[in-house]
Structure formats: C-alpha cells, structure tokens
Image (cartoon, rainbow, N blue to C red):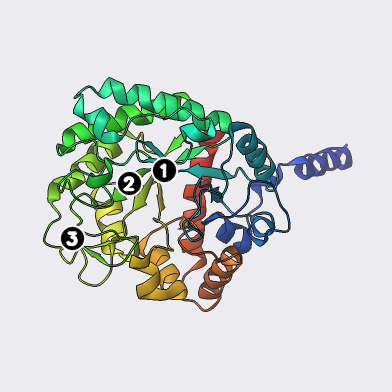
Amino acid sequence: MKRFIFSILTFLVCLAPAAQAQPSLDEMIGQMLLVGFRGYDLDMDNPVLQDVKALNVGGVILFNYDVMQGRPQRNIQSPAQVRKLIAGIKSLTASPLLVSVDQEGGRVQRLRKENGFMETPSAAELGASYDPSRSLWAGRIVGMVAAEAGFNLDFAPCVDVNVNPESPAIGALGRSFSSSPRLVAACAREFINGLHEQGMLSCIKHFPGHGSARVDSHLGVTDVTRTWQQRELIPYERLIATHKPDAIMTAHIFNARLDPKYPATLSSATINGLLRRKLGWDGVVITDDMNMKAISSQYGLDKSIRLAILAGADMLLFGNNLSYDPLIARKAHGIIKKLVEDGKITRARISESHARIMKMKKKLD
C-alpha cells in the first residue's frame, strides 16, 4: 500500500504544471525586450522575427511609416493584413507576446483611415470639450480597432501636461489633453477605461513629464531643468492611485533638479526614487524608444542598457525605426546577459523585472 501511495504521489508530481519551473536567465532577459521590425508578412528570414522566437522576446511594436527609409511602408497595410501578421507573430512564442502600437488619436495614430482603420480625435481635441466622457468614447474606439487587429498594448494615453503649447513633440502635435493636470488625469482615466473595456493594456507616458520641452528628444538632448513644473506629476499621482494604468513609459528628458547627471530613462533617482518609492508605482516601467538620439547619440547601446536597467526600467523598447538593426534583439540580449555574468547587474534584478512583466501579461488571460 505504501509503495502504491508513493507511486501515485510521484505521478502527481510529474503532472505538476511546467509553469512552476523557474525561468532561465535567457528567458527572463528576452521578456525585457520590445522590438520593431520591417515587413507586412511573417517572413522567417527576418532576423528580428527569428530572435522573437529564439530569445523569448517579450513584445513587438508595429508602425505604419518607416522613418529611416522615409516612406509609408513598414508593417501596416490593411486590417486583414495586420490581423494575419499579428496572429503569425503571436504563434512564435509560448509566452503571451505584447503586440504594441502608438494609437493616441489625432496626429499620433499608426492605424489610419487610409489603411482602412477608424480614427479618433487628438488628446487636445478631447480635452478641449472639458468632458472626460469623450475620452471614454475615444478609448473604446481605439481599443476596439486595435484589439480587432490583434494588438494588446497601446502606448497611450499621453498624460503630459500642456505647459508649453509649442513643445515640438507634445503641444504642437496636440498630444496633451490640457494645461490642467487634473483634467489630464480625468481624461486619461476615462481613455484607459475605454481601452480596458476592449481588453487592451494601457501605457501612460512620458514620465516625469514632457510637456514643457522646447526641443524634440527624437533629435537630441532635451533639457527641461528650467521649464519643468512639479504639477506635471499630478496626473501620475492620481492615476497610480486608481491602479488603472498597466505600464508607465519614461521620457528621455534631462532635468537637473531630479538628477544632475542622467535623463529620466537612465536615472535611478527618477525611476526607482521618484516614481517607485515616492509615487508608489510597483508596476512595469517601459523605456521610450532607446533608438532616439537623446539616448543613442549620448550613451551608446551598452551603457544605455546598463543604466536603464539599474535605474528601474523593466522593458527596453527598440523601435528599430529611427535607425534599423536587424540584430538589435540579440545584441541587447547579449549585452544584458554579459552584464549579469560580469556582476554589474544581479540576476535578482532581472528576476524582479520578469515578475512585473509576467504579472502584467496575466491581465491578457
């Protein structure tokens, strides 16, 4: 009888779900990467897509325009084509894959009318009504359109306060709901509610506030030391308190009042200190595109990756659009692994990010 019971217990142990096994370092590192690629189809000759499969990459981002080539030929051609492409990409990994898009409305939407998608107004137009319910409507439409195509993460809403209406990357593009941080928070909350109703994850941006910038961080160093205002944190304080955002994206802005040495994306004082400890955010932090000149031209790939992870970032976004490197995923993966092997980043730090990412992905179940 004892032998029989022992055999049964052994059999049950063997049936225990594989998910209980600890992920390998390689698997955890892969989850920290979110990359862009070229192509309308699931072309497995594409090194980026090969690495999505081989490296357990955490997510991809799709664009409608190839910035480096200067033409509207990238990933998005029609609703049917996008659905097929995304379904194919999702089949490459066992882990849920984040398939992301910048779909804010107005000037910043990759799913456009000319490609057969329904568009929504800009944040500025929504905020001008002083009626947050309009943002709920817009979030529902964005969520429906994106989810039907297969996306599950929208890098929206933008919660930058419109401190400088002529800010080239925010105010001038109508990406801010308002100059009132409280109205920004209210509109963003409703936009997130709309996304969630359609099963979409949200990512608010750009922490700790890009609305006062006088130059575009896509093009180079963006110093907001003299223009940034404390009230730009109010939307984050209010939204974090609601537990609604699914992720927060950092800005590549430099603010000597917050960190005299590094821009926000690479700043432990800003991410670990201000965002996590002071404001209480314990969820996923995603960097803005690491290919943007404010980072890439100043720090290089190795240093920027090391600093971003030590600062508290969980996922590193390589849009692979401002510049294009078909080997970007394996290069970034290799850099992170060597940092761990050399003792410059602990395995525990990687595990910390992996746990946050997987917790967020469970919302997609």
What residue would you read off at disc 1? Answer: 155
Q: CA distance from mark 3 to mark 1?
A: 23 Å
Nearer-N-terminus badge (2/3): 2
Residue 234 at x, y percent in the picture:
19, 42
In the rendered structure, are the residues bearing label 2 and label 1 in contact, judged by CB atoms less than 8 Å apart? yes
Task: Kindly give the residue lying farthest to the bottom in the view shown.
Answer: 342
What secondary structure is found at the residue carrying circle 3? loop
Quarter of the image holding residue 22?
Answer: bottom right
Label at residue 205: 2
What residue would you read off at disc 3? Answer: 224
Label tally: 3
What's the residue type where badge 3 is placed? Val
Decide which of 181, 327 is in the foreground and name it. 327
Residue 363 at x, y percent in the picture:
51, 35
- Above or below 360: residue 183: above
On the question of residue 130 being in view, the answer is yes
In the rendered structure, are the residues bearing label 3 and label 1 in contact, judged by CB atoms less than 8 Å apart? no
Q: CA distance from mark 2 to mark 3?
A: 16 Å
The quarter of the image holding the C terminus is top right
